[in-house]
Image (cartoon, rainbow, N blue to C red):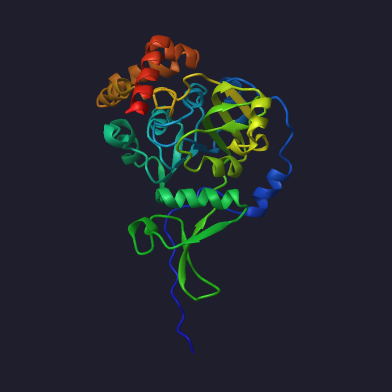
Amino acid sequence: MSKAVELKQGQNQLFTDPDADRAREFFRHKSRAMANKVTTAEEAVKTLIKDGDYITIGGFGANRIPTAILHEIVRQKKKNLGFAGHTATHDFQILIAGECIDRLDVAYIIGLEARGLSPHARRAVESGNIKLTEWTNATLSWRIKAAAMGLSFLPARNIMGTDTFKYSAAKEIICPFTGQKYVAHPALYPDFAAIHVHECDVYGNAHVYGASVSDQDLAKAAKRVVITTERIISNDKIRQHPEATFIPFWCVDAVIEVPYGSYPGNMPYEYFSDEEYLKQWLNVEKDPAEFNKFFKKQIIDTKNFNEYLDMNGGIEQMIKLRAIEHLTEKK
C-alpha cells in the first residue's frame, strides 16, 4: 500500500479569483468591436476602475510605465485597490504614496533597482496596514500566463521548500502522469491593466519595441485594458505588418495618446529615464512631511500629465532625455 504524500500550501491570502469559467463568462460578454477607443486618462480611470478593484501595471521596472494613468488613479482618490508587484518600481511609489493600495501580491516592489530603496514605500509596507502575499517575478508571470491561457493554474517547480512558498497562496499538487510533486500557481485575472506602448491605432492594435515582459499575456488576462501610447498611427500602417501587432484591438477598452508617457521612466528607443528626478524623489521621501508637500505639488495639484511634464522641464527636458537615449543606443 503506497504511503500518502503530504501536500503543503502557502499560508497567505489569494486576492483574486482563479476560476477560469467565471473569467470566461466575463470575457464572453466583453465587446470585441473594432471601434474607435480614443479617450482621456481622466475618463478611462473614471469609467474603468472602481474602488476595491485589483489592478496591474505593464512595463518593466521604470521602463515603459503608463505614468499618466498612475497619476490619474491618485488624483481620483481610488482606494482599496489590489496590486500585482511584478516588476514594480516608480509605479508602486506613486500608488503607495497616493494611499491607493490595501493588498499586494509581492515579487519586486520597494527597490528602484540600482537607484536604491524607496523610504516611503518601505514605511508603508512595514506599517502592517497592507496585506501581503509573496511570489517571485517568474511566478507572477506564470500566474498571468495561466489567465491568458484561460486556465485556473499552471504547474511549476520553483519556490518549493522556500519561505516564499510558505508566505504565498500556492499549493502543492501531484502530477497525474509521474506522481511527482509540483507547485500549482493560481491564475491571476486582474480587473484592470494599464500598459504603455510605442504606437497603436485608434482601435488598440499596438506595437511594442524592446523588452515586452508579460504585457501580451497581461492584455489577454485583464478584464479591462487601457493602452497609453507615445503616438497614434493609422490602421493602414498596422495592416502593413500584422505580425508586429503585440497587443490586438480585441483586448483593449481605451486608447490614450500620451507623448513622453513613461516619464520619468525610460521608453526604449524613445527617451531615457530622468535619473535626477528619480533621485530627487528618493531623497525627499526620507522626510515624510517634505514628501507630502512634494507629492501634492507634483501629482495631486497638477491638472493633467502635460502640466506635470511642464513642471519638470517640459519639452526641453524631454528633448535632452531623447538625446541621451539615442546616444546610449550608439554606444
Residue 123 visible in the displayed image: yes
Q: Is residue 112 shown left or right of residue 23? A: left
Task: Reply above or below: 251 against 229.
Answer: below
Residue reaching furthest to the bottom:
1
Query: Which residue is pictured at 60% across the width and 55% down the height?
Result: 151
* Residue 33: % across, % down: 74, 33
Compared with 160, 246 (above or below) is above
What residue sits 34% from the left and 35% below the top? 124
Q: Residue at x 49, y 90 (%)?
A: 1
Query: Relative to the observer, which residue lies in front, 28 or 271?
Result: 271
Q: Quadrant of the C terminus?
A: top left
| Picture residue at 58% right of the left edge, 31% below the top | 226
Residue 132 as seen in the image, left or right of residue 217: left
- In the image, taking residue 34 as reference, residue 285 lies left or right, namely left
Question: Whole-percent x and y of residue 16?
Answer: 54, 48
Q: Is residue 291 above or below residue 99?
A: above
Q: Quadrant of residue 242?
A: top right
User: Is 100 in front, or is 175?
Assistant: 175
Q: How many marks?
A: 0
Question: Does residue 50 appear anywhere in the picture?
Answer: no
Residue closest to the eye, 130 or 199: 199
In percent of width and height, residue 245 lies at 60, 36
Instruction: Residue 210: give x, y in percent of width and height.
Output: 46, 35
